Image (cartoon, grey):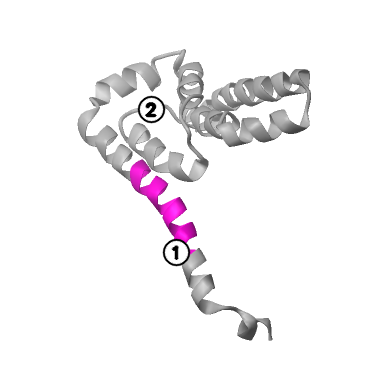
Amino acid sequence: SSIRNIQWPQFLREMGQESWQIGRWLLIAFLLEALITLYVPQDMIAGVLGETNVLAIPLATLIGIPLYLTNITALPIISGLLAQGMQPGAAIAFLIAGPVTTIPAMTAVWGIVNRRIFAIYLACGLFGAMILGFIANIFL
């Protein structure tokens, strides 16, 4: 069996390294969630990203652009923002826009397509995030 051929010390070392790679970002995300929940006034989040602001979804999309977040690390942050009054559609837009605009994602796309296709990729990702955010608000 192939399990017997595994070099367990190497396997465990690599598993630990990968766990650290993911775990440290999750730890930072959970700390940010706690900071948002404890120290950012609820009325501020509700005012900027809440139900009463018609620009909440475009703002959430724009906020997601510079943040280096994957969906795994964004979830705790979104949880904190939702608890503070962020509208669900804005959360969806934030979750979509962030990964589309991470440096690794953009680098990968840039490396295999021309500038026009890259611009279309970004436009579809960002406008798609906003459109899905508005649709999500209808149903959530």
Residue 19 appears in which quarter of the rendering?
Answer: bottom left
Q: CA distance from mark 2 to mark 1?
A: 36 Å
| Residue matched to label 1 | 16
101 displayed left or right of 13? right
Residue 45 sits above or below residue 109 on the image = above
Residue 28 appears in which quarter of the rendering?
Answer: top left
48 displayed left or right of 38? right
Q: Specify the segment rendered in magenta.
A: 15-29
Image location (x, y in percent) of residue 93: 53, 27
Q: Secondary structure at mark 2?
A: loop
**Number of dots carrying numbers:** 2
Residue 14 sits above or below residue 71 on the image = below
Residue 30 sits above or below residue 12 on the image = above
> Which residue is drawn at the image coordinates 49% and 76% (left, top)?
9
Image location (x, y in percent) of residue 131: 61, 22
Tell me the mark number nearer the camera, choosing from 2 and 1.
Answer: 1
Q: Amino acid at mark 1?
A: Gly
Residue 83 sits above or below residue 19 on the image = above
* For marks 2 and 1 on the same chain, the one whose residue lies earlier in the sequence: 1
Q: Secondary structure at mark 1?
A: helix
| Residue matched to label 2 | 86
Q: Please say whether residue 66 is one of the residues in the magenta stretch.
A: no
Q: Please say whether residue 28 is one of the residues in the magenta stretch.
A: yes
83 displayed left or right of 91? left
Q: Which one is nearer the viewer's eye here, 71 or 129?
A: 71
> Which residue is drawn at the image coordinates 62% and 35% (left, top)?
105
> Which residue is drawn at the image coordinates 72% and 20% (left, top)?
120
> Which residue is drawn at the image coordinates 51% and 27% (left, top)?
137
Q: Which one is nearer the viewer's eye here, 48 or 124?
A: 124
